[in-house]
C-alpha cells in the first residue's frame, strides 16, 4: 500500500509563523517587563500554597535563574522568603534553563499532553535539583482559586469544562500528530 503524506493545519500554521518577521513585531520593553512581573506574581501565588516549596527555595536565596526560549528570556532570583523576584538584567545566572523546542505549537502540544517541554539545564547542580523538585511537586489548583472569586459550584463547572476541552484538544493533537508530514496514513 502506498504511503500518503498529509499536512495538518498545525504544519501550515507553524510554517506561517516561522515566516513572520518577528523582530518587527517585538513588544515594547514596558510590556515585556509587565508580562514578566505578572509571571512572577503567578509563580509566587502557586509557591505560597506549598510550604515545602517555599522552604526549598529559601535555601537557594540570592541564586539567579535565567529562563529563556528563543529570543525571550528573564532572570529570576530566589528570595529569603522562599519566593521569586525579577533579578537585575546584568546579574550572572547560577542556572540557565533553555526551552529547546523552537516551535510554539510543539511546546503547546507537550504541555497539553500533560508533559513537560524539553529543557536544557546548565549551571549549579543543587539549584537545578531544587527547580526540578518544584516542577515535579508543585501544582496550581486553579479550581480552588476560582472558587474564592466566583464560588464553589461555578468554579467546579468551569473546571470540568476546561478539563473536557483539554482532553478533546489532546485527542485532536494526537490524531493530528499521526498525520504529520513524513508519517504515513493507513
Image (spheres, rainbow, N blue to C red):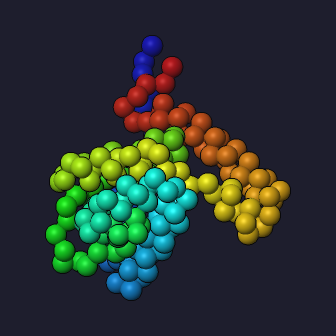
To which quarter of the image does residue 32 belong? bottom left
* Horizontal side, residue 43 vs residue 102: left or right: right
Count every numbered label the image shows and give the total: 0
* Horizontal side, residue 135 vs residue 78: left or right: right
Residue 14: x and y in percent read 41, 53
Picture residue at 19% right of the left edge, 53% below the top: 124
Picture residue at 34% right of the left edge, 52% below the top: 131
In this picture, is 27 found above or below 171?
below
Task: Residue at the far top: name it.
Answer: 1
Residue 34: x and y in percent read 43, 80
Picture residue at 63% right of the left edge, 40% below the top: 167
In this picture, is 78 found above or below 144?
below
Which of the two residues, 171 or 137, is positioned nearer the viewer here? 137
Picture residue at 43% right of the left edge, 25% below the top: 184
Q: Locate the N terminus by quadrant.
A: top left
In this picture, is 155 found above or below 126?
below
Amino acid at each position: 500500500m502506498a504511503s500518503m503524506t498529509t499536512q495538518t493545519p498545525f504544519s501550515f500554521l507553524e510554517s506561517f509563523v516561522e515566516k513572520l518577521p518577528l523582530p518587527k513585531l517585538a513588544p515594547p520593553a514596558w510590556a515585556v517587563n509587565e508580562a514578566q512581573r505578572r509571571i512572577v506574581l503567578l509563580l509566587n501565588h502557586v509557591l505560597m500554597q506549598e510550604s515545602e516549596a517555599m522552604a526549598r527555595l529559601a535555601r537557594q536565596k540570592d541564586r539567579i535563574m535565567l529562563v529563556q526560549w528563543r529570543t525571550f528570556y528573564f532572570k529570576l532570583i530566589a528570595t529569603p522568603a522562599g519566593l521569586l523576584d525579577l533579578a537585575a538584567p546584568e546579574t550572572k545566572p547560577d542556572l540557565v534553563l533553555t526551552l529547546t523546542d523552537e516551535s510554539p505549537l510543539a511546546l503547546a502540544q507537550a504541555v497539553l499532553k500533560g508533559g513537560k517541554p524539553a529543557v536544557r539545564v546548565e549551571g549549579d547542580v543543587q539549584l537545578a535539583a531544587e527547580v526540578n523538585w518544584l516542577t515535579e511537586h508543585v501544582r496550581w489548583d486553579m479550581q480552588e482559586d476560582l472558587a474564592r472569586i466566583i464560588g464553589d459550584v461555578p468554579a467546579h463547572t468551569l473546571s470540568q469544562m476546561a478539563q473536557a476541552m483539554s482532553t478533546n484538544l489532546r485527542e485532536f493533537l494526537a490524531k493530528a500528530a499521526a498525520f504529520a508530514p513524513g508519517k504515513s496514513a493507513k
